[in-house]
Amino acid sequence: MFVKEVAVQNQVGLHARPATFFIQKANEFKSSIWVEKEERRVNAKSLLGVLSLGIVGGTTIRIIADGSDEQQAVEGLVSLVESGFAE
């Protein structure tokens, strides 16, 4: 299991378009991936799950992965969040 915390950089947080980019990136990996905000943990590959966390800009989240490519998955998603979802 590999875990890393990251602060959401963009102002709107993980809503609609940024969340879609996040889920697409998560689905590139084989590992099981979760996003955790406070005490709630959801599947990072589920749009409804990620949106249900109500993540706004400035929020610190934890990205957790478990599987064969767990470290690459977490690092890739952390980089995406840190970039402010600039594609």
Image (spheres, rainbow, N blue to C red):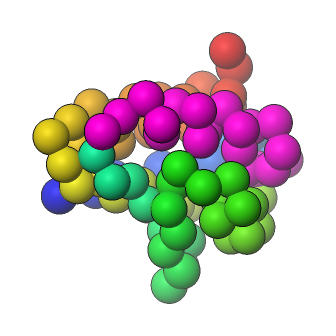
Give the residues in magenta.
12-30
Residue 45 image position (x, y, % from top left): 53, 50
User: Is residue 46 magenta-colored?
Assistant: no
Image quarter hosting the N terminus:
bottom left
Q: Is residue 86 above or below residue 6?
A: above
Residue 68 image position (x, y, % from top left): 15, 40
Q: Is residue 49 above or below residue 7?
A: below
* Residue at x 28%, y 46% (from the top left corner): 31
Q: Residue furthest bottom?
A: 39
User: From the viewer's perspective, is 36 left or right of 49?
Assistant: left
User: From the viewer's perspective, is 3 left or right of 25?
Assistant: left
* Residue at x 66%, y 32% (from the top left corner): 21
Question: So how many labels did they put on this image?
Answer: 0
* Residue at x 49%, y 74% (from the top left corner): 41
User: Is residue 27 magenta-colored?
Assistant: yes
Which residue occupies the foreground of this view, 44 or 76? 44
Which residue occupies the foreground of this view, 80 or 47? 47
Asked if residue 15 can be seen in this view, the reply is: yes
User: From the viewer's perspective, is 34 left or right of 2?
Assistant: right
The quarter of the picture where residue 10 lies is top right
Residue 38 image position (x, y, % from top left): 53, 79
Asked if residue 55 can be seen in this view, the reply is: no
* Residue at x 64%, y 65% (from the top left corner): 49
Which residue occupies the foreground of this view, 46 or 87? 46
Residue 87 image position (x, y, % from top left): 67, 15
